[in-house]
Amino acid sequence: MMSRCSARLAPLFFLVPAFLGGCVDMPRPFGDPGREAQRLALNTPPPRLAIPTPGESLLDNKAAALWAKDMTEGLLSQSVPAVAQSVKPGDWWLNMTATLQGDQVVPRFVVMTPKGEARGHQDAPPIPASLWNQGDPQMLSQLSAQEAPQIANVLTGIQAAMMQQDPQSLKRRPARVYFQGVDGAPGDGNVALARAFATSFPDENDHFQQTAKGADYIVHAVVKISDGPKGLMGHPQQHIEIVWHTLAADGKEAGAATQLHDIDAHSLDKAWGDVAMAAADEAAGGVRQIITNYSGRDHKPLPPEPKG
């Protein structure tokens, strides 16, 4: 999904941040956050979710194994690194069962910790027992595709609960951000944009620091100018693109806020003036959103499973 908004910056200049898929969809439930992120999130589970063949599924062995395979594929499509295999020491795993309730079967999915404790669950809608007992491949595939997003949400809630307990997570402290500056702008754009962004970006959730060492995120903007249409009445135009790259601590790109528009040719060859402040102000909001989405700091923690 692409988020769009626009703000008038100066005559004939608009900014359109386009939040790329990576920043919208992150964090990936149980994804590998990298070495530095693992240090920052002490309770992060291992980057794998085992899915063993269910033994209490009311299915024959062949159909049960197919169910585990389909669920693995469904979770992989949700960016959960699931593996259809037996549980190994240290694994988080998905316990899939099915219970008979009258003439209906209710599939249940329970996320288990390495200690064998239930940490979250998801119940699927009842399925007629006559259909379930057939172990129909299409039915199992549809069930897995339907429930995978719900299970991914459970996993995200588990990670959010872990973050809530970790004083070093971004739920408990501001993000430390290192700004590398701006490159490629004509005129005084590199300096003007950098100064404006340094003024607009910091808030109670995101702080700047002076070095890249120990930073949670690194931001770097790149400006590109290219020839545009000739324009009306002999007024040629240029295309301007500003991309605010946001890298996570492990060097992976968390997302990029992109600003695009056509401008009068060479109108920014000297002083950027108010254009720089308006551009940086909107970009600051985009970068904050990237950090929020990628870190999961706004995700709602999943409460503990009730005992007994």
Image (cartoon, rainbow, N blue to C red):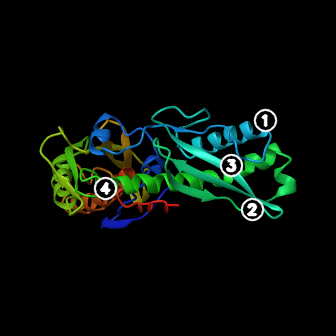
The residue singled out by tag 3 in the image is 144
Q: Secondary structure at mark 3?
A: helix
91 relative to 234, above or below: above
Q: Going from the N terminus, do you reach mark 3 or mark 1 first? A: 1
Q: Residues within 10 Å of mark 4 (few under 14, many from 20)?
A: some
**Where does the image place residue 153, in percent across and percent down from the top left?**
52, 56
- Residues at marks 3 and 1, CA–CA distance in whole angstroms: 16 Å
Relative vertical location of residue 83 with respect to residue 40 in this rendering, above or below: above
Tell me the element at label 1: helix
- Identify the residue at image location x=67%, y=50%: 97
Check residue 25 in the rendering and tell me which mark sits there, or answer none. none
Helix, strand or loop status at disc 2: loop
Q: Which one is earlier in the sequence, the residue at label 2 or at label 3?
A: 2
Q: Amino acid at mark 1?
A: Lys
The residue carrying mark 1 is: 62
Give, as a three-letter code, the residue at label 3. Ser
Eye-nearest disc, 3 or 1 = 1
Please name the residue that numbered disc 2 is placed on. 126
Q: Residue at x 27, y 44 (%)?
A: 40
Q: Are marks 4 and 2 in contact (CB under 8 Å)?
A: no
Task: Return the residue nearer the eye: 73 or 250.
Answer: 73
How packed mark 1 is, by other alpha carbons closer than 10 Å (few <14, some 14-19, many 20 or more), is few
Q: Contact, CB < 8 Å: mark 4 with mark 1? A: no
Instruction: Answer whether labels 2 and 3 touch (C-beta < 8 Å).
Output: no
Q: Is residue 11 above or below residue 86?
A: below
Image position, residue 143 (x, y; %): 72, 52
- Marks 4/1: CA–CA distance: 41 Å
Rounded to the nearest whole Å, what is the CA distance between mark 4 and mark 2?
35 Å
Left or right: where 197 falls relative to 288: left
